Amino acid sequence: MGTSEGTATAPLDLLVIAASNGANLQLAQRFAAAAAAQGLESRVVDLVALDLPLFTPLAQTAGTPPGVPALQGQLAAAARWVICAPEYNGSIPPVLTSAIAWLSVQGDDFRALFNGRPVAIATHSGGGGHTVLVALRLQLAHLGAHVVGRQLVSNAHQPAKDDSINDLIRRLWHLHPLPT
């Protein structure tokens, strides 16, 4: 799939994707700061701020929303990703599901952006948070990503620990990136 014309982005060690603008955005910022402390170039992308329309076949007939090519370019330019997503009704939040759906119709091979991509997953959820990570792990594996075995679950009673964030970044770093 690659990047679309005009959306090329400089190579990046780690892109941290926030699928909410609350606690998961704060968690994403902590991951980016921890990566920087480990000498990695990182950036946070806030899916909520992109304000992508809900993906539907009807919406697709209107064309690709302006934020999709830029998001695709950022994702393609990053060797590794961390996804921070809250649990919505026991599953993946709509903003993330919709973004993945938009990305999946941007070329002939809907898995190309994900194939072989090292990805770590984390959540800060009001509930348990485990089911969003199971659902996300299944979807990412289906798309061909290499998901780190360890995941991070946090909530108001069990906040994310710096040691856990650092360990997850180290584990992610040991997965082989896509060939360039």
Image (cartoon, rainbow, N blue to C red):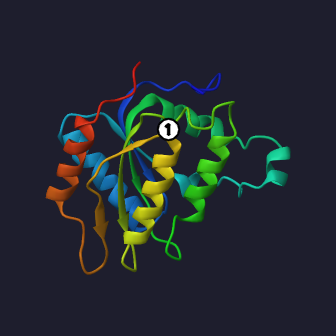
Q: State the quadrant of the N terminus.
A: top right
Q: State the quadrant of the C terminus.
A: top left
Instruction: Residue at 20% x, 34% y: name it.
Output: 39
**Image-based side of 86 in relation to 162, left or right:** right
Query: Residue 59: horizontal and vertical position, in percent?
Result: 81, 52
Query: Residue 155: horizontal and vertical position, in percent?
Result: 31, 75
**Image-based side of 92 in relation to 54, left or right:** left
* Above or below for 21 versus 46: below
Amino acid type shown at disc 1: Phe
Looking at the rendered structure, the secondary structure element under dot 1 is loop
Instruction: Residue at 52% x, 72% y: name it.
Output: 88
* Above or below for 45 versus 178: below
Which residue does the numbered mark 1 point to in the structure image? 114
Query: Residue 132: horizontal and vertical position, in percent?
Result: 44, 66
* Above or below for 81 versus 122: above
| Observer-nearest of 7 and 169 | 169
Please identify the quarter of the rendering in which residue 129 is found.
bottom left
Instruction: Residue at 52% x, 43% y: name it.
Output: 143
Query: Residue 91: horizontal and vertical position, in percent?
Result: 51, 69
| Observer-nearest of 63 and 133 | 133
Please identify the quarter of the rendering in which residue 13 is found.
top left
Q: For the view shown, which residue lies furthest in the top direction?
A: 180
